[in-house]
Every structure is written in C-alpha cells, then in structure tokens.
Image (cartoon, rainbow, N blue to C red):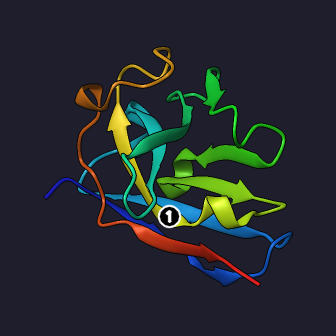
Amino acid sequence: QLQLVESGGGSVQPGESLRLSCTASGFTLGSYDIGWFRQAPGKEREGVSCISSRGRIINYADSVKGRFTISRDNAKNTVYLQMNSLKPEDTAVYYCARTLWCSRWPPLELDYSGWGQGTQVTVSS
C-alpha cells in the first residue's frame, strides 16, 4: 500500500515551534516531489510548501516564508516541515502528498496524490 503518514502536530502557544514529519510507506519517497498543505476550519485546503525529489526546487506560500522550512532525508524516507514563530492563523490540519510537479507553484491539488490522514496543529494562547 502506497501511503504517506504525517506526524508531529500538537498544541503550542504563539511564537513557539513544531516540526512535522511526512514518512512514506510502500514506495521510495526519493522518487517524488512532496508538498505540504493545510486546511483550517471552514477554509479551503491551501499549499504551504513543496520540495522536489532531490531538494533543488523549494516553494513556500507567502504566508509562511521566513518562518517555515521544508527539508527531506531520502535515506529515512521522510520530509520535514520545521515551523517557527507560529501564529494562531497557522492553526489547521496539515497534510502531505506526492507529486511530480513541485515546479508548479501555487500548487494544483490535482497534481498531488497519496494524501496522508493529516496532523492537527493548534496555535493558541
């Protein structure tokens, strides 16, 4: 079964940090570009960041530039999203998915597949 599994979410206060992980099961993550998306209550899912298979292409949503950093360790079959200086508006369920088109930004969800179940991030004082 080809699957992505997100982890690392939690509840933090504004200004704090979290690191999300996206781990592949059943396929070699290094063969794909990987994107992070998020969906807040009552809002559409939006692209947060994307990294190409070898890490040469990286894209971020304007709302997270300078605060979030995407990286990958293909040997561990894992992509990370380091989230610093978190804000209440970052509260959402975060998903990862695979694609061959990280170069397309903003992303088209139709280009992505293998969605994980998501991990909740809550930023509140």
- For the residue pair 21 and 16, the one nearer the viewer reads as 16
Give the percent coordinates (x, y) of residue 43: 39, 52
Left or right, residue 115 beside residue 47: left
Task: Say which quadrant the C terminus sits in.
Answer: bottom right
- Mark 1 neighbour density, 10 Å: few (under 14) some (14–19) many (20 or more): many
Task: Say which quadrant the N terminus sits in.
Answer: bottom left
- At x 86%, y 69%, the residue is 15
- At x 44%, y 71%, the residue is 119
Left or right, residue 109 beside residue 105: left
81, above or below 91, in the image: above
**Residue most toward the top?**
103
125, above or below 69, in the image: below
Q: Quadrant of residue 32?
A: top left
Left or right, residue 107 beside residue 50: left
**Residue most toward the left?**
1
Residue 20 visible here: yes
Q: The disc labelled 1 sits on which kind of residue?
A: Ala
59, above or below 114, in the image: above
- For the residue pair 42 and 6, the one nearer the viewer reads as 42
- For the residue pair 105 and 87, the one nearer the viewer reads as 87
Give the percent coordinates (x, y) of residue 50: 54, 34
- At x 35%, y 39%, the residue is 98
Q: Which residue is mark 1?
A: 92
- At x 34%, y 30%, the residue is 99
Q: Quadrant of residue 49?
A: top right
Left or right, residue 65 beside residue 27: right
Element under disc 1 = strand
